[in-house]
Image (cartoon, grey):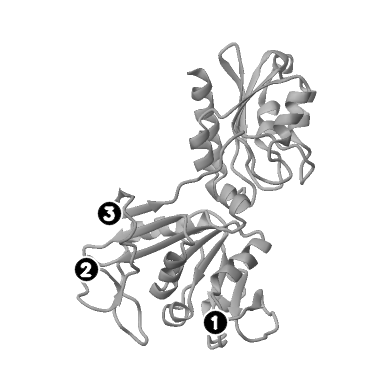
């Protein structure tokens, strides 16, 4: 179908904003006149023009807009934010038909953009390639429907199920290859925040930055109940915003914020609540094993990536247990197999 063909192009365009539009959703738009694309655009950077605006601007003969159809992967916004409402612009340009992939779950839109277009007498079709459009913005949708960040867990494990040797210091065992490490940095660039536990922060002294991929560094999250981590760690170098969840009071300093929570209770709901308050819509959890297992046991995850190494460790730190989950796919990246677990997005169009 032609509608699906043009919506696929919208999705292709939208993906160009993967590392630059958060916390906004990725959106692509295509304008068609007499079965020919005369304009297209996507949301490039958060705070700048939306996809519909860029698509309309790209049309050379503006008079054709009155006889055209605009395809957009997500419902046009109906409110004033950092930019004016896209629904208003579509109405102003007298575009008679709008084809939408899925509704926007953001409370200030959530069907109101569609209603505004319909009230203006425009023909509106909703739900073309809905599943693919929902998948495109699964992080944004999860954040707005579940009121928590979209959570991705990842680790690399040996062929016999360990993620590291038992150690009190020294470097961790390297189970990823240089090329699969690039994939990790890609996921970091696509995430708003990245999290490790106290043990991992102390032993590995990670920077948790994007060094081998293009994009912004995610906010760094670390658990430190007793404030035992030394200030000399890379996490506290001030180069990237860092949040420390602790049971103690501490003044913020050097781009590091300390958040006091009750460690006598299940801390994950409070951690996720604090990330939501700060509009951190996606969280990548990199370790260690205890922290990863706590997310699995609590059901707080949306995707899991497990890199399977051919190296055998024979003993050490056991990998998290995800054996109860049966539905996964495998991906081949370079010389490694990656198991990919994924929860379903349940948001539906109206």
Residue drawn where x is 62% and y is 78% of the image:
261
Q: Which residue is mark 1?
A: 224
Single out the mark in the foreground, 3 or 1. Answer: 1
Residue 127: x percent and y percent? 56, 30
User: Which disc is residue 337 wearing?
Assistant: 3
Residue drawn where x is 70% and y is 14% of the image:
64
Label 2's element? loop
Picture layout, residue 164 above or below residue 322? below
Single out the mark in the foreground, 2 or 3. Answer: 2
Q: Earlier in the sequence, mark 2 or mark 1?
A: 2
201 and 273: which is toward the camera: 273
- Which of the 4 quarters of the picture holds residue 247? bottom right
Q: Residues within 10 Å of mark 2 (few under 14, many from 20)?
A: some
Picture layout, residue 325 above or below residue 25? below
Residue drawn where x is 62% and y is 36% of the image:
103
Can residue 239 be spotted in the picture? no
Q: Earlier in the sequence, mark 3 or mark 1?
A: 1
Q: Which residue is mark 2?
A: 160
Residue 236: x percent and y percent? 58, 78
Picture layout, residue 43 above or below residue 290? above
Which quadrant is home to the C terminus? top right
> CA separation, marks 2 and 1?
30 Å
Q: Residues within 10 Å of mark 3 (few under 14, many from 20)?
A: some
Residue 301: x percent and y percent? 47, 59
301 and 85: which is toward the camera: 301
User: Which disc is residue 55 wearing?
Assistant: none
Residue positioned most to the top: 34
- Left or right of residue 263, residue 293 in this image: left
Residue 133: x percent and y percent? 53, 37
- Left or right of residue 179, residue 84 in this image: right
Number of labelled discs? 3
- Left or right of residue 346, residue 81 in this image: right
């Amino acid at each position: 179908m032609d509608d699906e063909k043009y919506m696929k192009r919208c999705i292709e365009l939208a993906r160009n904003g993967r590392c630059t539009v958060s916390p906004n959703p990725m959106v692509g738009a295509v304008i068609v006149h007499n079965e020919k694309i005369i304009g297209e655009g996507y949301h490039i950077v958060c705070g700048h023009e939306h996809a519909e605006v860029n698509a309309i601007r790209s049309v050379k003969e503006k008079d054709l807009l009155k006889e055209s159809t605009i395809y957009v992967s997500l419902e046009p916004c109906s409110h004033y934010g950092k930019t004016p409402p896209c629904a208003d612009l579509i109405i102003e340009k007298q575009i008679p038909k709008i084809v939408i992939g899925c509704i926007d779950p953001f409370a200030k839109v959530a069907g109101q953009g569609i209603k505004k277009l319909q009230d203006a007498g425009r023909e509106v079709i909703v739900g073309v390639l809905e599943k693919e459009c929902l998948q495109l913005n699964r992080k944004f949708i999860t954040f707005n429907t579940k009121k928590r960040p979209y959570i991705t867990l990842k680790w690399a494990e040996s062929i016999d199920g360990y993620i590291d040797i038992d150690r009190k210091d020294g470097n961790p065992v390297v189970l990823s290859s240089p090329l699969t490490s690039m994939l990790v940095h890609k996921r970091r660039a696509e995430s708003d925040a990245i999290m490790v536990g106290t043990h991992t922060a102390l032993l590995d002294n990670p920077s948790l930055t994007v060094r081998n991929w293009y994009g912004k560094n995610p906010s760094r999250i670390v658990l430190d109940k007793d404030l035992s981590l030394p200030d000399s760690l890379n996490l506290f170098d001030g180069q990237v915003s860092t949040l420390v969840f602790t049971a103690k009071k501490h003044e913020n300093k050097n781009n590091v914020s300390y958040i006091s929570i009750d460690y006598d209770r299940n801390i994950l709901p409070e951690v996720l609540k604090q990330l939501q308050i700060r509009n951190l819509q996606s969280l990548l959890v990199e370790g260690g094993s205890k922290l990863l297992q706590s997310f699995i046991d609590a059901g707080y995850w949306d995707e899991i990536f497990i890199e399977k190494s051919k190296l055998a460790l024979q003993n050490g730190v056991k990998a998290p247990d995800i054996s109860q989950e049966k539905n996964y796919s495998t991906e081949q990246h370079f010389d490694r197999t990656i198991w990919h677990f994924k929860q379903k997005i349940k948001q539906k169009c109206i």
